[in-house]
Image (cartoon, rainbow, N blue to C red):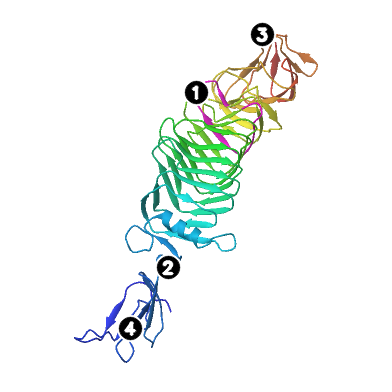
Amino acid sequence: MSQSGIYSTTGGSTTGAVLTVTGNLGGAVSPDVGGNLTVSGLNGFVTTGTPGSNLLSLSNYRNVSNYVVSNDGLSEYSTIQSAIDQAVTDGADANNPALVWIYPGSYAESVAFADYVFVAAALDEVYIFGNCSYFCAGLLSISNINFLSSNASPALDVSGSGVLNIDSGQITANTGIGLSITGSVNTTLVNTTLVAPNPGSYYLSMDGGLLTSFGGYYINNDTQNDIVNFSIISLISTSCLNAGFFLQSGSSLSALSCYFVDSQTILPNLTLDNDASANVYSCVFSSANNTGYFVQGGGSFTYDNITPTATATELDPSLTLNGGTEITARQNASTTIAQGVTYIVDAAGPIVFTLPGIAQVGSFFKIIGYNGTYSIAQQAGQTIHQGASSSTTGVGGSLNATQQYTCVYLICTESPTDWVVVESSGTFILV
């Protein structure tokens, strides 16, 4: 029977004999004929009792594991490291993993984690202040732990070739790196927050390995995080706030239903080196990058159903674009056209859209004249073709929408000089 909560006693005498102990769910536990009450278990809450007997069992978080850590003096271990070391000494391995259970509190120590010694807490109220590490050859799971570093070394430094799973909690770097991954470690983050609140700090550094993130927030102070050496990042429903990624040397990123925002005026949301790539689906981008590009570089960018919402609404024309369908941007000022964007004219106009100076064959854009009119201007050597008619080649030529709600869809057929109207509605004038 459950015996949790508030207890009361009845009976007794001046000699101190206790006749019954009753939990808040009832069911008295009585002493034996000698007035003795036997208690089993460690300090904690009453959980079980046998009515009519003299056995009262107590248990709580302090005996869910052989390795319980607290800084209140009530557990066998007062440091996390001492509990982990004992579990290793006791032979923790893949067949007999150990659990280190940590009582809420702050622990100032740099913990070296070990394979198959899992670490957890009941609440997200455990804080480790230091530079923790894990050389991974097997498996480690960490739950409800917060890591904080105030120096240049990582809050959590992971290397090796095994598997690391982190569930909930937060990793914070005030001056250095939050989470550093080196080697071929397979890391999974679930509802985990990475934070680098100060200039010059980074929430993530990867030199190889695979990182998969489900939910959570990545928060930076306008600093791009370096991802190098064929690292792979997969983000699902993750928010990246004031934090760009710089993918280099064969690295790649995949994102589904994510939100990228960066208020820094000189950084895009993503930078792709020539041999890097990104696959992005159903994501929102918000960047104030002064180049106008929310994704830039010379790498490969595959996308579908993405929306730029700030002042940087274009894709760098140096990118290799693969099969993207829609990027939607509301436009209230004249701009140079970005490949793959659907522009919604959101001003009385006329707004001037200028053909890009660099474009690949098959590149496209669409314009919807929602709140006004617009024209498409040309650069040197460029021509727009509509049916049997063509514009004047060069800067003097243009395609002009004369009515509200006029729409057009163009594709590049000769890079970057010739553009063909594939679909249109409303009245246009070729000049």
* Closer to the eye: label 2 or 1: 2
Q: Earlier in the sequence, mark 3 or mark 1?
A: 1
Element assignment for label 1 = loop
- 175 to the left or right of 240: left
Is the residue under label 1 in contact with that under label 4 (CB below 8 Å)? no
Q: Earlier in the sequence, mark 2 or mark 3?
A: 2
Residue that extends furthest to the left in the rendered view of this protein: 14
C-alpha distance separating marks 3 and 1: 30 Å
Tell me if mark 2 has few (under 14), some (14-19) or many (20+) residues whose alpha carbon lies within 10 angstroms of its own: some
C-alpha distance separating marks 2 and 1: 53 Å
Going by the numbered disc 3, the residue's amino acid type is Val
* Closer to the eye: label 4 or 3: 4
For label 1, the residue is 266
For label 4, the residue is 37
> Was residue 71 drawn as part of the magenta stretch in this picture?
no
Element assignment for label 3 = loop
C-alpha distance separating marks 4 and 2: 21 Å
Going by the numbered disc 4, the residue's amino acid type is Leu
- 229 to the left or right of 156: right
- 27 to the left or right of 215: left
